[in-house]
């Protein structure tokens, strides 16, 4: 299939739009709240690019496609976007979906800047076509394991569901904790109801439970059950994947959702750009922006800078990842080849372990810095 635009992008001077595909989960079973924040960041940055004159006088156009957390839909979207002349693709939140998109983009020769997915192996083989802003799962989850150790937790339980992403997270935690005297007890949340899971926690004498499961089901009923079980008083509940970042977590769980540490990819104190963008995102969303919204904004900002400096030819974009040096909302963004990671990687955005303050659940506390 010929996926090239009718006219080479590098030669276009007619004011036609520069098209960038945007992959976002906007319908269930995708995490719609995360998708809404990601899209808000992507769209805000695109609007600002166009307000500043676009790409060499050409408007930037986002072609938004809903992945609904479905890898096959992501692959089909990559095919469609390539055929529509997109010069690059941005976005995606779910790691398994991003992996399918990255693999297809690599096969078609379509540059893909992944915003939020963290699975280390986005592609089976090293590729020049894919870059990523979010930290690799191994980097962030080792930071989370260090937080657990520093807080005195050695017996860790994980409530898991079948998933490449959750399995990778469990393996990272076990490999990092074991040499430091920690153990990981796996509890199958697909087979155990919340009451049986609490029985397993009590029998295993774990002091911390990590939720490696979907939200709101089964995460919410698990949290409620643990909070109400007198045998588990003092049990730390954690969610390294970031479920408590979003307002929906507080809305559903209230006080039960406080003091659940998670990974957050924001600096403790934002700089001037982060403050300005944060205010604009809050206005657009009608609520406090998550780190995912900032990832979306930074994605388009990086691509726009790259397109202005190096042109809109797909191969030229792919060759330009190592030359990126863009001030984003969370620091200076550069891409490097990182051991064990097959894509061009920002190493690293800020990594913090935070939770919601029990005395004010809309306020976040920093528990550990990576």
Image (cartoon, grey):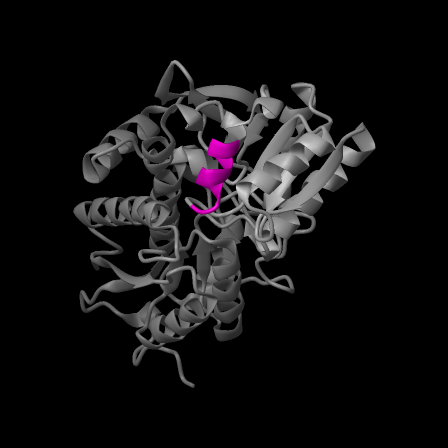
Classify the position of the N terminus by image quarter: bottom left
Q: Residue at x 55, y 27 (%)?
A: 229
Magenta stretch holds residue 87? no
Residue 178, position as x, y percentages in the image: 79, 35
Residue at point 51%, 38% (across, down):
222
Taking depth in this image into account, of 302 and 41 the one nearest to the observer is 41
User: On the rendered structure, is 308 left or right of 94?
Assistant: left
Task: Say if residue 171 shows up in the picture.
Answer: yes
Identified at 39% across, 48% down, the residue is 299
Q: Where is residue 210 shown, x and y percent of the image?
A: 59, 36
Front residue of 57 and 70 = 70
Residue 80's x, y, as percent? 35, 75
Q: Is residue 3 above or below residue 191?
A: below
Task: Look at the image and give the residue range highlighted in magenta.
Answer: 217-225
Q: Quadrant of the C terminus?
A: top right
**Residue 223 sits inside the magenta stretch:** yes
Find the residue positioned furthest to the bottom: 1
- Indicate the position of residue 82 as horizontal and vertical percent values: 38, 73
Is 190 placed above or below 370 here? below
Front-most of residues 51 and 137: 137
Q: Is residue 268 at least partly visible in the picture?
A: no
Horizontally, is 4 left or right of 64 in the view? right
Q: In the image, is 319 to the left or to the right of 143? A: left
Q: Residue furthest top?
A: 359
Asked if 80 appears above or below 57 in the picture, the reply is: below
Count of marks placed on residues: 0
Q: Quadrant of residue 364?
A: top left
Magenta span dominant secondary structure: helix
């Amino acid at each position: 299939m010929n996926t090239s635009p009718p006219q080479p992008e590098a030669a276009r001077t007619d004011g036609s739009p520069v098209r960038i595909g945007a992959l976002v989960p906007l319908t269930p079973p995708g995490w719609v709240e995360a998708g809404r924040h990601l899209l808000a960041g992507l769209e805000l940055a695109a609007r600002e690019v166009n307000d500043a004159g676009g790409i060499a006088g050409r408007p930037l156009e986002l072609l938004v496609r809903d992945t609904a957390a479905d890898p096959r839909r992501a692959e089909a979207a990559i095919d469609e976007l390539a055929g529509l002349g997109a010069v690059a693709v941005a976005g995606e939140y779910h790691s398994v979906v991003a992996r399918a998109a990255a693999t297809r983009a690599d096969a078609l020769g379509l540059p893909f800047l992944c915003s939020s997915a963290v699975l280390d192996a986005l592609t089976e083989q090293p590729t020049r076509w894919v870059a990523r802003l979010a930290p690799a799962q191994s980097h962030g989850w080792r930071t989370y394991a260090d937080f657990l150790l520093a807080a005195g937790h050695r017996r860790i339980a994980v409530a898991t569901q079948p998933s490449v992403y959750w399995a990778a997270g469990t393996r990272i935690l076990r490999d990092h904790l074991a040499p430091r005297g920690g153990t990981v007890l796996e509890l199958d949340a697909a087979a155990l109801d919340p009451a049986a899971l609490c029985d397993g926690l009590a029998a295993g004498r774990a002091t911390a439970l990590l939720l490696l499961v979907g939200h709101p089901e089964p995460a919410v009923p698990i949290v409620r059950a643990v909070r109400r079980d007198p045998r588990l008083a003092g049990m730390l509940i954690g969610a390294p994947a970031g479920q408590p970042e979003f307002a929906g977590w507080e809305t559903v769980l209230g006080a039960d959702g406080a003091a659940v540490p998670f990974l957050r990819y924001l600096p403790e104190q934002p700089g001037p750009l982060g403050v300005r963008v944060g205010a604009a995102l809050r206005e657009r969303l009608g609520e406090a922006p998550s780190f995912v919204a900032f990832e979306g904004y930074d994605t388009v900002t990086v691509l726009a800078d790259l397109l202005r400096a190096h042109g809109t030819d797909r191969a030229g974009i792919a060759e330009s990842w190592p030359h990126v040096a863009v001030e984003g909302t969370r620091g200076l963004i550069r891409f490097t080849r990182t051991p064990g990671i097959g894509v061009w990687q920002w190493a690293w955005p800020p990594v913090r372990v935070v939770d919601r303050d029990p005395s004010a659940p809309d306020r976040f506390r920093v528990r550990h810095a990576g």
